[in-house]
Amino acid sequence: MIDSFAILLLVMAAAAFLCRVAGFTLMRLVPVSPRIEAALRATPLAVMAGIAVLALQSGGLAEALALTAVVGLTVLIGSDVAAALLGVVIVAALRWAGL
Amino acid sequence: MSAAPFTWDGLRRGARDGMPLGLSIFAYGLGFGLVAAQAGFSVAKAVATSAAIYSGSAQLAAVNLLQTGSATLWMLFATILVINARYILFSAALQPWLGQVSAPKAYASLLLLGDANWMMCMRRIRDGEQDRAYLAGTGVPMLVGWLSGTGLGAGAVSILPEPQALGFDLMLPAFAAAMTAAMVRVRADLVPVVVGAGMALVLSQEIGPAVAIIGAGLAGGAVAALMFRAPA
């Protein structure tokens, strides 16, 4: 077992820090070609689509309706942040209604 | 080197845009504080954990592991490494932009890197954000929200409503969906979206959600690299 909370914290912080800086540091050593840049530009879209679709998969009807509304609202009102916040309100309301 | 701007103005602008993120992270922090307190963490220990790791999913996994009573330091290290491996990808994607300022500024900014502000920054970068302090700015309200939420959650376990009842568990997916919708401009942008979503579904079935997110990012990037044609 682990007896010192300080050591525990240090080890966990080291792991978290390593992840935050590793990609950045590695990319400093690699010359960024236009091809690599295209890959890096596509990464956020793929990650975000992944996050959203996993929430759909693990969620029910309320989550599906709310996330669909978020996509529609983003296009409609032109603000992604406002649409996301509205999505949270929608899912809370749907859950409250028992969906 | 430091040719790119890194100003107070950018930091302030980031902090302003990060406010709604900070609010949602506050609610998520309440949730973590609650779990930590139930696992026997004091308020101080819970807040220290949030400050040291600064990643909700990794912290929840760590607390779960500690609760089993048979966790070793290596197991904890490895668990956090696997769950946070997506940050390797996140910081790699930021490098061409963030690498334009001095190393201390860049690394200090990366300390404030989270899921939500990474998404927000990548979106703003695509829209032409030049000020590299913007990233750290978006991180400030998130850090404040995360730490205060953790403390309050750990200290006031019995009187709080479930964060789930308020819909806050859907905050990150909602931001992800909204920013995906906002970032898809041309038809080619749909390719990483479809590849990422498909890969995430397959991997989450086969392995688990942490690997699924990394796999989604890698697959989307790989397909974009393969499809890349140098402008003639």
Image: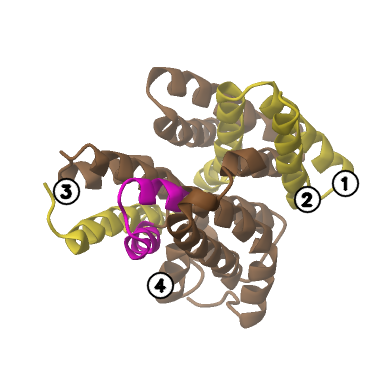
Give the residue pinned by disc 1.
Answer: A77
| In the rendered image, residues at marks 4 and 3 fall on the same chain | yes
Residue name at image x 54 percent, y 41 percent: A43
Q: CA distance from mark 4 to mark 3?
A: 30 Å
Q: Are marks 3 and 1 on the same chain?
A: no
Give the letter of the chain under mark 4: B
Q: Nearer the viewer, residue B70 or B195?
A: B70
Q: Nearer the viewer, residue B198 or A65?
A: A65
* Position of residue B8 measured from the top left corner of the image (x, y, whole percent): 62, 81
User: Cα distance, mark 3 to mark 1?
Assistant: 48 Å
Q: Which amino acid, mark 2?
A: Ala
Q: Secondary structure at mark 4?
A: helix
Q: CA distance from mark 4 to mark 2?
A: 34 Å
Nearer the camera: disc 4 or disc 2: 2
Whether the magenta-drawn stretch holds residue B43 is answered as yes
The chain drawn in brown is B
- The verdict on a common chain for dots 3 and 2 is no
Asked if labels 4 and 1 share a chain, the reply is no
Residue with the mark numbered 2:
A82
Left or right: B83 as drawn, with respect to B218: left
* Colour chain A appears in: yellow
Which residue carries the number 4 mark? B103
Disc 4/disc 1 C-alpha distance (Å): 39 Å
Camera-side mark, 4 or 1: 1
Where does the image place residue B116, in percent across and percent down from the top left?
58, 51
User: For the residues tagged 4 and 2, is the chain the same?
Assistant: no
The answer to which image quadrant residue B120 occupies is bottom right
For the residue pair B187 and B196, the one nearer the viewer reads as B196
Mark 2, chain letter? A
- Whether tag 3 and tag 1 are in contact, CB under 8 A, the answer is no
